[in-house]
Image: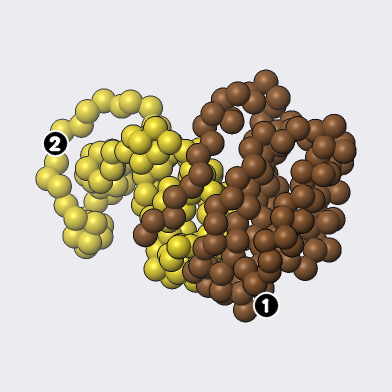
Amino acid sequence: MIYETALVLRTDIDEATANSVKAIVTDVVKTAKGEILVNDDWGIKTFPQTLGNNHKKGHYVYFMYKANTQINSELERRFRINENVIRSLIVKLGDDKAQETIVKEYKTPKFNN
Amino acid sequence: MTEMKKSAPRAKKEETEYKKPMDRNNDMGDNDFEGGDGDFGGYDVDKDRKMFAKKRSDWFLAKKTSPDWKDPSTYAWLVNEFGKISPARVTGLTPKNHRLAVAAIKRGRAMGLISYLSNQTAK
């Protein structure tokens, strides 16, 4: 199965710590013999309303990968523990057969308004 | 309104003068409801349905896209200024696209891409 995750990270952290959070996804997926298809960074966005502990901005990170339910439960567990992750979301996209079309259709979203 | 049961085609009756529902209520005492099913005292319901039925024009079908939680511009127009999702009978979406749009809006809200209380999106 192909899944996508998006993470909202705190903006008041270093690049190194942000990279360490990104490494959670890549490490967990690779150790369980999954495959990362898309690794994207949407940049820093301002929220329409404050989130969590009065956060006004967030750093959005996006991944698309081939995995199973065990990997996803492990990822969710680690996202919850990590303090730098404000929000996280895992969505199922489809079967392995539709991999090419799903990866082709992906575009980094625009936030122009 | 548009998804009402399709009644069996019945023979055309003699054309009667169209009356507004309020006027009809005033005349109710005069009419004996003997016309059978669907006859409300010379008031043709099917004619009314055709008059007020809107043509479906699905925004997503026209643009050949589908609602995606990652892109707020696809679903922000479905939310009003108080953060309420407008019903399909107002927006004219197909039932399938409306379901997908509602799911996308709720995911977008959870990820902080669109507000719960207004139609503002992330910038």
Q: What's the residue at 26%, 25% (across, down)? A: B11
**Residue B22: quarter of image:** bottom left
Q: What's the residue at 29%, 47% (across, down)? A: B40
Task: Please state which of the two labelled residues, at mark 2 or mark 1, is closer to the viewer.
Answer: 1
Q: What's the residue at 85%, 32% (across, down)? A: A33
Where does the C terminus of chain B fall, quadrant-wise? bottom left
Q: The yellow chain is which one?
A: B
Q: Position of residue A15 (x, y in %)?
A: 67, 61
User: Please, which chain is the residue tagged with disc 1 on?
Assistant: A
Q: Mark 1 points at which residue?
A: A53
Which secondary structure lies at badge 2?
A: loop
Relative vertical location of residue A92 with respect to residue B113 in this rendering, above or below: above
Residues at marks 2 and 1 on the same chain? no
Q: Where is residue B5 in the image (x, y as percent from the top left)?
A: 43, 36
Left or right of B40? Residue B60 is: right
Left or right of B77? Residue B71 is: right
Amino acid type, residue under disc 2 in the picture: Glu
User: Please, which chain is the residue tagged with disc 2 on?
Assistant: B
Q: Mark 2 points at which residue?
A: B15
Between the residue at mark 2 and the residue at mark 1, the CA separation in whole angstroms equals: 68 Å
Label 1 near label 2: C-beta < 8 Å?
A: no
Amino acid type, residue under disc 1 in the picture: Asn
Q: Which chain is brown?
A: A
Which secondary structure lies at badge 1?
A: loop
